[in-house]
Amino acid sequence: MRYEHLHLMHAGPQLLPASVRETFWPLGGRVLARTIVRQCVVCTRMKGQTAQPLMGDLPSVRVNPDFPFNSCGIDFAGPFMISSKKGRGNRISKAYLCVFVCLVTKAIHLEAVSDLTTEAFISCLRRFVSRRGKPYSIHCDNGKNFVGADNELGRVIQSSVQAVSDYAANEAIKFKFIPAYSPHFGGIWEAGVKSAKFHLKRVVGNASLTFEELGTLFTQIEAILNSRPLSPLSSDPMDTTPLTPGHFLIGRPLMSVPSAPAQNCKTNRYKALEQLRQAFWERWRMEYMAELQNRAKWRRGTSTIDVGDLVILKEDNLMPLHWRMGRVTKLYPGGDGISRVADIYTSTGTIKRAINKLCPLPVHQG
């Protein structure tokens, strides 16, 4: 059967038993044909079917109440064409959109960035901290500007150790990087980028705005996105207004009509605000958290990868036969015991990749 598979130029599990049955009638031929095709290294590489572990549980920062933007994710979008001035003689250059997404309330903060250098990102981060407060942790991908910002902040902290106490050093922002080429690890900020570009493409189109106009447009889109409901709307007309990220920022949706100020001075305003804040978090727990428990995909694991397995690394810009080959040296199990990230030893060194970017190769030949 294996000879016939190679003779027919890697025939599939349907053609292979049909050809063999012209001479022999093997018992369990269809099962044997599928086994031969599955154990063929060339067929496995051409198919390029990656391992798919179960969907993991949400991290603790997503399900525990906290201040807005205390833990956030960052991503960049663009470029967008901007003009140096209005009228004739203007010069066209590029600008980018930096998206900050609160991991607890899904509130969004948009900043216009002139370029993708480390200095521009640190300036953008300083503007964000001045308006939203310093976050405890920042989750982002492995972009060079983020890695550079992490190193730059580390150098600033190390240089100031002699001048400040350990308390100031412990308040450093923690950068947490997801594995390379794994955007599904940061779905919440990828969705924020998608929502922001949804409005930008329909408003700007191919026009070239000035940097001031682009920054104003980003701020308006930010207010619109922070007025979106966090949970599905109810058909009951007696229900209250839907819960939005704006409730956790200013107490109401940013695009809604403000209510009249309270004239009764006898009520305890602090107590009323505290009850209102607790009501927001109770609705967040009852309405928003229930929606996060749904898992639309990755509900069944396809195959497991162990230390020592021979795998190929899926690369989007190359054909399957050009994918690099490596061996698994270390696994990183999650809280549920399922590994979703692994270290791969290749000809160019050890790299870290997500499990769904690895195609296991058959090691037994029957």
Image (cartoon, rainbow, N blue to C red):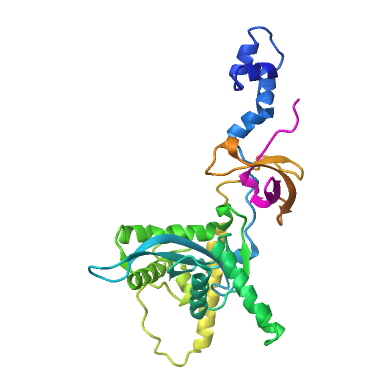
Q: Quadrant of residue 291?
A: bottom right
Q: Quadrant of the C terminus?
A: top right
> Residue 256: image x %, image y %?
37, 72
* Residue situated furthest bottom in the rendering: 266
Q: Quadrant of residue 208?
A: bottom left
> Residue 272: image x %, image y %?
50, 83
- Residue located 72% across and 53% down the image: 333
Left or right, 208 with reference to 119: left
Left or right, 74 with reference to 340: left
The one of 269 and 51 positioned closer to us in this rendering: 51
Question: Magenta segment: does it hold 133?
Answer: no
**Residue 33 higher or lower than 332, as above or below:** above
> Is residue 47 in view?
yes
The one of 346 and 268 positioned closer to us in this rendering: 346
Left or right, 94 with reference to 19: left
**Residue 189 higher or lower than 353, as above or below:** below
- Residue located 60% across and 37% down the image: 49
Q: Quadrant of the N terminus?
A: top right
**Residue 212 higher or lower than 303, as above or below:** below
Count of numbered marks:
0
**Residue 120 higher or lower than 328, as above or below:** below
> Residue 263: image x %, image y %?
39, 89
> Residue 314: image x %, image y %?
60, 43
> Is residue 234 in view?
no
Range of magenta residues? 340-366
Left or right, 201 with reference to 295: left
The one of 67 and 72 positioned closer to us in this rendering: 72
* Residue situated furthest left in the rendering: 88
Question: Magenta segment: does it hold 341?
Answer: yes
- Residue located 50% across and 82% down the image: 273
